[in-house]
Amino acid sequence: MINVGVIIGSTRPGRNGEQVARWVRDLAADHAGGAARFRLVDLADHRLPLLDEPVPAAASPGRQPHTVRWAEQIGSCDAFVVVTPEYNTAPPSSLTNAIDYLHREWGGKPVAYVGYGVYGAVMAVQKLRAQAGVLRMADIGPQVALTLREDFVDMVDFRPRELHVAAVHRMVDELLAWARALTPLRTPAEAVGA
């Protein structure tokens, strides 16, 4: 079974990300049937301080207890849906900080994006796509772009338009296809008889 982490990228009090991520998780799980397991990965639960590992993750795994827990959480996923707002044309610092903590745990895994903001977090997602490429992730398809004016009441009560359901379904289909195709990159060589 494919394990998909639905990452809630904001830790801001009063954030909209949790309700968006739950909607994505529920729609995705229903659409995928038993082909995948979708679970929330909430950055607020991990309480990662600003990067405090003395060696970059590309050179050596982190040793701080919070880094080890975060690595285990991300390492157990085969694919990701990142739910992100856009702050000043960028993803939240909590999200980029969490990504920077790890390296190999991201590689060989597909990632899709659901953005929300005034313009659907398009610029924030573009920055995340560039980061994904460096980490050897498969950045898939167009994002699901939710706007605060059209998909929220008073910019806080999430009421997505019906057109987004089909977009989430397409995203899930592509994400799972890539997750299956990339299995050899996530499987240790000794497990596949190499």
Image (cartoon, helix red, strand yellow):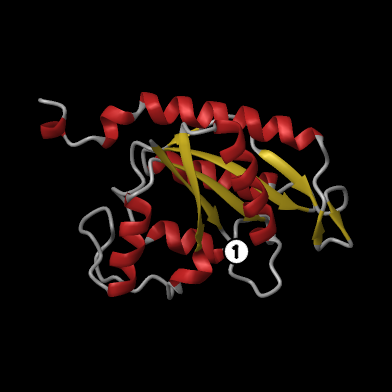
If the image is split into quadrants, where does the N terminus sit?
A: top left
The residue located at (46%, 74%) in the rendering is 47
Residue marked by disc 1: 10
The residue located at (33%, 49%) in the rendering is 76
Q: Is residue 81 left or right of residue 107?
A: right
Dot 1 falls on a residue whose secondary structure is loop
Q: Residues within 10 Å of mark 1 (few under 14, many from 20)?
A: many
Q: Position of residue 67 (x, y in %)?
A: 32, 67
Is 121 rendered above or below residue 133? below
Residue furthest to the front in view is 34
Q: Position of residue 61 (x, y in %)?
A: 23, 60
Q: Is residue 164 left or right of residue 184?
A: right
Please state which amino acid type lies under the numbered disc 1.
Answer: Ser
Q: Is residue 191 left or right of residue 94?
A: left
If the image is split into quadrants, where does the C terminus sit?
A: top left
Given residues 86 and 24, the one toward you in this image is 24
Given residues 33 and 25, the one toward you in this image is 33
Label total for image: 1
Q: Position of residue 105 (x, y in %)?
A: 32, 49
Q: Is residue 101 left or right of residue 121?
A: left
The residue located at (28%, 73%) in the rendering is 65
Occupied quadrant, residue 135: top left
Is 48 rendered above or below residue 123? below
Occupied quadrant, residue 68: bottom left
The residue located at (49%, 59%) in the rendering is 96
Q: Position of residue 183 (x, y in %)?
A: 31, 30
Is 93 rendered above or below residue 114? below
Occupied quadrant, residue 102: bottom left
